[in-house]
Amino acid sequence: MKKPQPENDRRTLLQARDEFVTQWGTIGTAWGINRTMAQVHALLITTGHLMSTDEIMEELKISRGNAHKNLRDLVSWGLIRSVVRKGERKEFFEAEKNVWKMFCIILRERRRRELRPAQAALQECAARTKGLKGAEAAAFNKQIKALSDFLELADSVITKISRSEQSSMVPWALKFLK
Amino acid sequence: MKKPQPENDRRTLLQARDEFVTQWGTIGTAWGINRTMAQVHALLITTGHLMSTDEIMEELKISRGNAHKNLRDLVSWGLIRSVVRKGERKEFFEAEKNVWKMFCIILRERRRRELRPAQAALQECAARTKGLKGAEAAAFNKQIKALSDFLELADSVITKISRSEQSSMVPWALKFLK
DNA sequence: ATCTACTTTCAGTATTTTCTGAAAGTATGA
DNA sequence: TCATACTTTCAGAAAATACTGAAAGTAGAT
């Protein structure tokens, strides 16, 4: 007994979304991002409607505490925002769906959370060994300096990119590739 | 009773190296890299001489199994290589110290290990929902397509950069910043 | 063939990270 | 003021990850 076409299509869609949520979770893990956070994000960028905490708990089969924490983390990254519908107490969430904007947000946050602490640590090490005598000390200082200078350059480039518009960067990237 | 200058300097150097090793370990963790692997790497890039497994175990106070595993992982990334000194059975290790080369190695490996699986997963999701009827399905497919296209562009850019010479990229970056 | 000087493996353990679920907290409105 | 409808917190449990140390494996030298 064959099901009607629209019903089959709907099932395929739901399965594909599930697949995407799962995969995005795995990918997130490889990128050092908590699996659930990546899954919640995946769910929100591929869902047409606003979602409540309860709906997310239900979809992903996770506890309230877990849903809550990861929603807060996503908000703090700026990847999703909370919306209050008038007349309702419940909080709803929606994701930034523009891929370029998502990318810029992630660049900025990773820069802030990972690159800048690294720079600070390197500069501290460089400063400490600045005037030390001996070939070994000089070599150490030089190596740290090279790392530090590189990170600084990378930082500037990332900052500039994350402030650019998609409309200026994408054509540029295409030109760069030629 | 004041110690002679060179002795003080030596102590400062060793402390700074320790500090660097610790910090690099923490930074590695933030980047999704195992702490010990980052520490072993830090040790090898800031040490003038070849190091044996035993010396690394001693410096970092880690077990043989742990040292072994992380050295192998670093070799598989291409960040360090093993050297056999003639006349000796023991294996020694040295790191790639050129910062640009290190950067390219990391780009290439992360592309291979993280970006490509992500691309494959997205393409699969896009293909599955290609011809589906309904506005929701169309929106889903469009969003996945946008992500997929973006990753593909990023992949190309990363590939190109990781194949470039420092001598061509660094001046270019400086120009880009202006 | 055996010894020696190593490297490799892996079962069990420790540590870190993440998750649950229930209790506590807060704001609205009757 | 109290009830309701939520959000937030957090101690303990579970899961994932990393580490140890000892035993097994390997290869050159005698």
Image (tube, coloured by chain):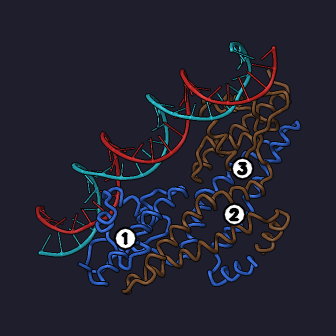
Chain colours: A blue, B brown, C cyan, D red
Residues at badges 1 and 2 in contact (C-beta under 8 Å)? no
Mark 3: which secondary structure?
Answer: loop
Image coords of residue A140 (percent x, y):
80, 42
Q: Earlier in the sequence, mark 1 or mark 2?
A: 1
Q: Name the subunit of mark 3.
A: B
Residue under circle 3? B78
Residue under circle 1? A15
- Amino acid type of the residue tagged 2 in the rendering: Asp
Residue under circle 2? A155
Q: Is residue A44 above or below residue C17?
A: below
For residue B177, the mark is none
Q: Does mark 1 fall on the same chain as mark 3?
A: no
Mark 2: which secondary structure?
Answer: helix
- Amino acid type of the residue tagged 3 in the rendering: Gly
Viewer-proximal residue, A140 or B33? B33
Q: Is residue C24 left or right of residue B116?
A: left
Estimate the spatial distance between the alpha carbons at disc 3 and disc 1, rounded to whole Å.
Answer: 39 Å
